[in-house]
């Protein structure tokens, strides 16, 4: 991941928090329009924040840290085993101690579930939890006498609305753009020769099939981040293709 | 035009010119204009075949058997037009010689293009036609809706898109390679770039890169296989994911982390380069060398 990308990722929790200055917030929103990865991360942060907000603080019955610390140290050096036909560490595909290592049998359709966070996501989640605590404190405080300056693009509590609103805006913008491009292409259709039309429709069919398959898979497994990203990519692909097709059609008409 | 056809085009034009024996067979010197540094060549709405080669002269020359094609220069813009017959059906075939650093803007409905020994930036968009780049040095964007793209020994950043055919890159040194196909294979070998994004909806990907420190490579396939060559000694921090497919590796890997779906992270060597491979329906294979 490049430094510039990290720059945006590090600001996502602030977007969720609603603590960014307006101009910086706008820059992040513009980046979110272009970056599916960050949109996903922002959505994940929002979900973590929402889930955390639903929790009530439960104090531990005793100090757990002395038990946890050595186990964390142990876990840091441990390799997680593959669930299907693979060993913990395939240091050698032909190892006799490893009858079904990665590479000799392969991993097929790993259905293991769980919540995994990257370092950035972890930091974001931590920030979201801290923010949630602050939010609870804020809700419990006496009402302020003056209005709170709104964050651009945010109509309600930032943890609940802001990223969803961002995604909605991105989705609406894309839908509008696709509609516009489709309209332009339809207008040009009569002037395109049958061969060109055949090419365009064949290519659109390939993209639409990929979108339909991705959608169907996502319906089966809505929490799968890979499928969300894959569908997003296919839809971006459709928009790019329509743009190229409209440009090509403009040559014909000129 | 098929792969064979573009090879014929390259072969028929390249030999005599590169040998310095004058004009390619069947072509006669027709048009020539003097140009200034910063001039741009613009070819629009033409169909046919064009071979564009760089040279160390301050002029643009067009050689063709067709006598109706004209070169013109106005305000830093050099154009190639078919006299007396405008519009998209204007057909052209021949060889353009341009200053190596000249920027190029090319577009057409049914146009095959070969760029050779040019170092300027180029933008090529065609509806139907094969595109070839050989020994190019500038940043180039090449898109064809129906045709193949082949690149050999290029430098610079490339954006390549072939909606319904294959893309082959053999030898690239540069900052970035972005390549996509809607319905075709991607063969990317001897690639030395800092950032690579390769995507095909319906086709296979074969990738061989140098895994330089800090580089990021991302491969996405909807329906097809991805084969990644990881040579001995390479350091890779990888992530693979698939919805309905296999992961097979001929190379020992250390699995670091499972993901929530059907994928995991792994590491090879010192993990100095980043690799991400996503295949919706197909096999992800890590090999030492490509077949």
Image (spheres, grey):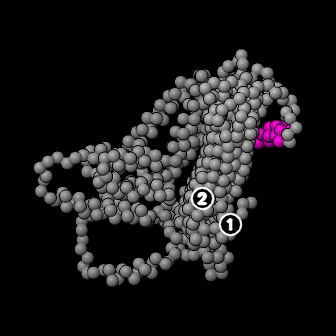
Which residue in the protein does label 2 denote?
A: B245
Residue situated in front as seen by the camera: A178 or A114 = A178
Whether the magenta-drawn stretch holds residue B12 is answered as yes
Badge 2 marks a residue whose secondary structure is loop
Badge 1 marks a residue whose secondary structure is loop
Instruction: Report the residue at 51% width, 73% height from top.
Output: A80
The reply to whether the C-beta atoms of the residues labelled 1 and 2 are less than 8 Å apart is: no
Q: Is residue A3 left or right of residue A61?
A: right
Position of residue B29 relative to residue B238, above or below, is above
Whether the magenta-drawn stretch holds residue A110 is answered as no
Q: Position of residue B248 (x, y in %)?
A: 64, 65
Which residue in the protein does label 1 denote?
A: B231
Residue situated in front as seen by the camera: A53 or B187 = B187
Chain containing mark 2: B
The magenta region covers B1-18
The prevailing secondary structure element of the residues shown in magenta is helix
Q: Residues within 10 Å of mark 1 (few under 14, many from 20)?
A: some
Q: Quadrant of the C terminus of chain B?
A: bottom right
Q: Is residue A79 left or right of residue A95?
A: left
Q: Is residue B13 left or right of residue A167?
A: right
């Amino acid at each position: 991941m490049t430094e510039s990308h990290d720059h945006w990722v590090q600001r996502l929790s602030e977007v969720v928090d609603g603590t960014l200055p307006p101009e910086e917030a706008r820059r992040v929103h513009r980046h979110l329009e272009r970056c599916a990865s960050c949109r996903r991360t922002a959505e994940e942060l929002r979900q973590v924040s929402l889930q955390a907000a639903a929790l009530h603080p439960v104090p531990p019955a005793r100090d757990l840290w002395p038990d946890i610390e050595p186990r964390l140290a142990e876990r840091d050096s441990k390799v997680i085993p593959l669930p299907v036909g693979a060993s913990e560490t395939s240091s050698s595909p032909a190892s006799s101690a490893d009858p079904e290592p990665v590479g000799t049998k392969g991993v097929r359709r790993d259905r293991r579930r769980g919540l995994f966070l990257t370092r950035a996501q972890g930091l974001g989640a931590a920030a979201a939890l801290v923010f949630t605590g602050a939010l609870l404190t804020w809700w419990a405080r006496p009402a302020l006498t003056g209005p709170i300056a709104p964050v651009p693009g945010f109509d309600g509590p930032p943890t609940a609305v802001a990223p969803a609103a961002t995604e909605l805006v991105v989705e609406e913008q894309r839908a509008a753009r696709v509609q516009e491009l489709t309209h332009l292409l339809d207008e040009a259709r009569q002037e395109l020769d049958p061969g060109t039309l055949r090419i365009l429709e064949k290519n659109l069919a390939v993209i639409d099939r990929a979108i339909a398959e991705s959608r169907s898979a996502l319906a089966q497994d809505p929490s799968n981040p890979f499928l969300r990203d894959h569908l997003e990519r296919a839809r971006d692909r459709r928009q790019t293709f329509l743009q190229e097709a409209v440009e090509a059609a403009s040559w014909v008409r000129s | 035009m098929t792969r064979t056809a573009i090879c014929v085009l390259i072969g028929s034009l390249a030999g005599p010119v590169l040998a310095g024996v004058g004009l390619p067979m069947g072509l006669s010197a027709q048009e020539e204009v003097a140009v200034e540094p910063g001039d741009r060549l613009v070819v629009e709405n033409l169909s046919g075949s064009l071979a564009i080669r760089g040279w160390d002269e301050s002029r643009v020359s067009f050689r063709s058997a067709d006598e109706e094609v004209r070169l013109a220069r106005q305000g830093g813009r050099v154009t190639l037009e078919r006299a007396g017959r405008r519009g998209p059906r204007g057909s052209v075939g021949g060889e353009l010689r341009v200053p190596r650093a000249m920027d190029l803007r090319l577009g057409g409905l049914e146009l095959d293009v070969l760029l050779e020994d040019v170092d300027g930036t180029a933008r090529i968009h065609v509806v139907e036609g094969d595109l070839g780049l050989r020994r190019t040095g500038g940043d180039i964007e090449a898109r064809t809706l129906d045709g193949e793209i082949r690149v050999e020994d290029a430098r610079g950043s490339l954006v390549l898109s072939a909606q319904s055919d294959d893309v082959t890159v053999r030898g690239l040194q540069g900052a970035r390679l972005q390549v996509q196909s809607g319905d075709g294979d991607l063969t990317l070998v001897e690639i030395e770039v800092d950032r690579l994004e390769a995507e095909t909806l319906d086709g296979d990907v074969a990738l061989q890169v140098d895994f330089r420190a800090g580089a990021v490579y991302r491969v996405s396939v909807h329906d097809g296989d991805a084969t990644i060559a990881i040579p001995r000694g390479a350091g890779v921090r990888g992530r693979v994911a698939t919805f309905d497919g296999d992961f097979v590796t001929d190379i020992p890997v250390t699995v670091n982390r499972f993901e929530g779906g059907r994928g995991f992270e792994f590491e090879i060597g010192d993990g100095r380069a980043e690799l991400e491979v996503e295949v919706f329906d197909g096999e992800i294979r890590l090999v030492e060398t490509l077949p």
